[in-house]
Structure formats: C-alpha cells, structure tokens
Amino acid sequence: MTTRHLLLIPGAGGAAFVWHRVVAELAARGHVGVAVDLPADDPAAGLAAYADVALAAATAYDGGRGASYRWTVVGQSMGALTAPLLVGRLEVAELVLLNPMVPAPRETGGAWWAATGQGPAAQEAATAGGYPGDFDLDVVFLHDVDPADAVALEAHEREETDTVFDEPWPLAAWPAVPTRVLAGADDRLFPPAFVERVAQERLGVAAVRVPGGHLNTLSRPREVVDALLA
C-alpha cells in the first residue's frame, strides 16, 4: 500500500482540532494527515499568511522532508479559499474541498454568501428539515457532534477576524489540478444540494455526498476518510 499524505486545512476559527479524528483514522489505515492551525484571530493575517502557514506545516513534516512528498490538500469550509493557493508552492496531487466555500476569482469571502445564494438555500433546507432557520451554533454546526468534542472545539477555535472575508480571492482561475468536492449530507450551513450546485457552476465538478453535518470531520471521521481516500 502506498502511503498518502494529506494536508488538512480548517475553516473559520482556524482550529486544527476539527481534524483530530480524521488524522487518527488516517494513521490507523497507514496514511498521514497533517492538520493546520491557522492564525484566524490575527487581523494582519490574510489568505497569503494562511497559505504560508499551511505550506510551513507540510514542509516541516517528517523532519523537514515534507516538501518532497505529493500531497492531497484538503480545504474544509472556508479552508477552500486557502487550499488552492498551495498549488505551485507544494507538490499537490489533488485538491479536495469538504463542505466548501468555493471561491470565484477576485470575489471576497464576504461577498461569497450573497453571490452563491447561501442564505436562501440554508433557509429552504431548514424548512424542509424542520429545524430553526435562524443561525444557532448548536443547531447549525453541532447538531451531530459529540458534546465532549463540542466543548473541546470551543477551547481550540479562535475568533475569526474580518481580514479573510474582506480581501479578494487572489487567483485568476482555479488551478489545473484534479479537484473533488465532498458535501455533508446533513450539513445545515451549506446544504448538500447547494454545494452540488455551486461546485457544478464554479468548477464543473459533481460533488459527492458524505454522511454528517458541517463538522463531519468530528462526527463522522471514518466516512470522511473513506471519501478522502476514494
């Protein structure tokens, strides 16, 4: 079996903790997951800084030999803004976007929500699913997460500044590397039908549904790893 190396980039809050169950599951199967902590609470840190931190984590792996490996770079949620920025700086075999914010060239993270129609899509899913449509952390993010993980996550996450949401996504086009999109079947922030539509419109990619909600890296790590290694 060939060992695969996965660089795991978190979403808003920048906590590598969201990947800890995935990292353990990968290791149990003989693969490597390097989870990145991002400087989410630093107002001076934008996407370029996030990419620098992710690159440093990959390069430092295996005593500094990480740059010699071929990596699957995985961006979860807002991490999809950072993951493509590693192409050309690291040997990237493929990009995988999990429950992602799929960016468009020069679009800001703040403009993404209205541009993609996330709000109406989330409200429609809430109505169909019979849960409150108003934003609530427990309802939207933690509904399928173990309470112990939910408490631990709060201790690890940082308060995301507006910096990344205010700056335009810097690439003129999506990198020319294989890209897959995974949509949480029970995601209440980015419902799967919404992710499927955006992935098709912006990347020409058919998203694949995987079990769990927006934080399925915590709630359904085995199934997420199945999808990452598929």
Image: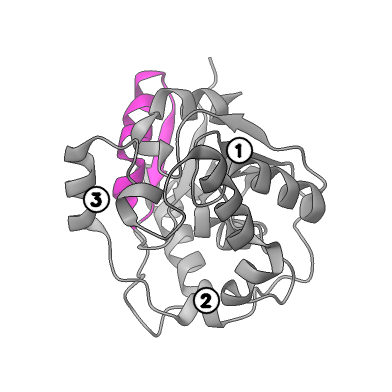
Q: Which residue is identified by label 2?
A: 165
Q: Which residue is pictured at 74% across the width and 71% down the height?
A: 105
Dot 3 alpha-carbon crowd within 10 angstroms: few under 14, some 14 to 19, many 20 or more = some
How far separated are the C-alphas under marks 3 and 2?
A: 22 Å
The magenta stretch spans which residues? 15-36
Q: Quadrant of residue 128?
A: top right
Q: Residue at x 45, y 44 (%)?
A: 214
At x 48% / y 30%, what residue is drawn?
224
Task: Name the N-terminal-most of marks 1 and 3.
Answer: 3
Q: Residue under circle 3? A: 153
x and y percent of residue 35 in the render?
A: 38, 47
- Note whether 209 is above or below 64 in the view shown: above
Residue at image point 40% right, 55% down = 57
Expressed as whole percent of the image width and height from the top left, the position of residue 8 reads 45, 46
- Total number of numbered discs in the rendering: 3
Assess disc 2: are there few (<14), some (14-19) or many (≥20) residues with their C-alpha within 10 Å of its C-alpha: some
Q: Is residue 111 above or below residue 126?
A: below
From mark 2 to mark 1, how far is it between C-alphas? 22 Å
Residue 162, label in figure: none
Q: Amino acid at mark 1?
A: Leu
Residue annotated with mark 1: 182
In what element is the residue under mark 3?
A: helix
